[in-house]
Image (cartoon, rainbow, N blue to C red):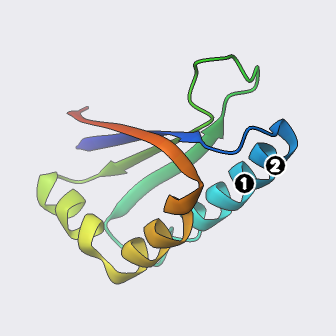
Amino acid sequence: MIRHVVTFTLADPSPEKRAEQALFVASQLRSLVGVVHEIIALDVVTDVNATPGNAHVALISDYEDQAALDRYQVHPDHVRVSSSIKPFFAARAAIDFEV
């Protein structure tokens, strides 16, 4: 199994606006469950302490293998969601590993 972890740092300086955007990002990413069949599990979390320097949102998702993750990456619904949330981000980092 491959675990895909992505962290997102939101660009807006306002904590209130970032909280609103984090909810939108989470809802968009969660909407992929049941639509993109390669997803075995998916969770979206936010930094509860709003610690300076930390990412604001993280996606944690699992796939059967690398081929399934590759199909997820190019799935039209994933591409659509990615395009809708990308403008909110100042930074993004990802890691994929076997579990």
Q: Is residue 51 left or right of residue 61?
A: right
Furthest residue in direction bottom, as rendered:
76
The x and y percentages for residue 49 are: 76, 19
Q: Secondary structure at mark 1?
A: helix
Q: Nearer the viewer, residue 71 or 8?
A: 8
Quadrant where the N terminus sits is top left
- Can I make out residue 2 in this image? yes
Where 66 falls versus 55 (above or below)? below
Q: Amino acid at mark 1?
A: Gln
Could you tell me which residue is drawn at 79 percent across and 45 percent down? 19
Give x and y (percent) for residue 14. Answer: 81, 40
Q: Which residue is mark 1?
A: 21
Q: Position of residue 93 (x, y in %)?
A: 37, 36
33 vs 21, nearest the viewer: 21
Say which residue appears at 52% left-offset and 43% top-offset.
90
User: In this image, 93 relative to 29: left or right?
Assistant: left
Tag 1: Cα neighbours inside 10 Å, few (<14), some, or many (≥20)?
many
**43 in relation to 36, above or below:** above
Residue named by callout 2: 17
Residue at horizontal 72 percent and vertical 54 percent from the top = 21
Apparent side of residue 57 relative to residue 82 in the rendered image (left or right): right
Q: Amino acid at mark 2?
A: Lys
- Check disc 2 and report its element: helix, strand or loop: helix
Of the pair 72 and 39, the residue shown nearer to us: 72
- The answer to whether residue 36 is visible is no
Q: For the view shown, which residue lies furthest in the front direction?
A: 13
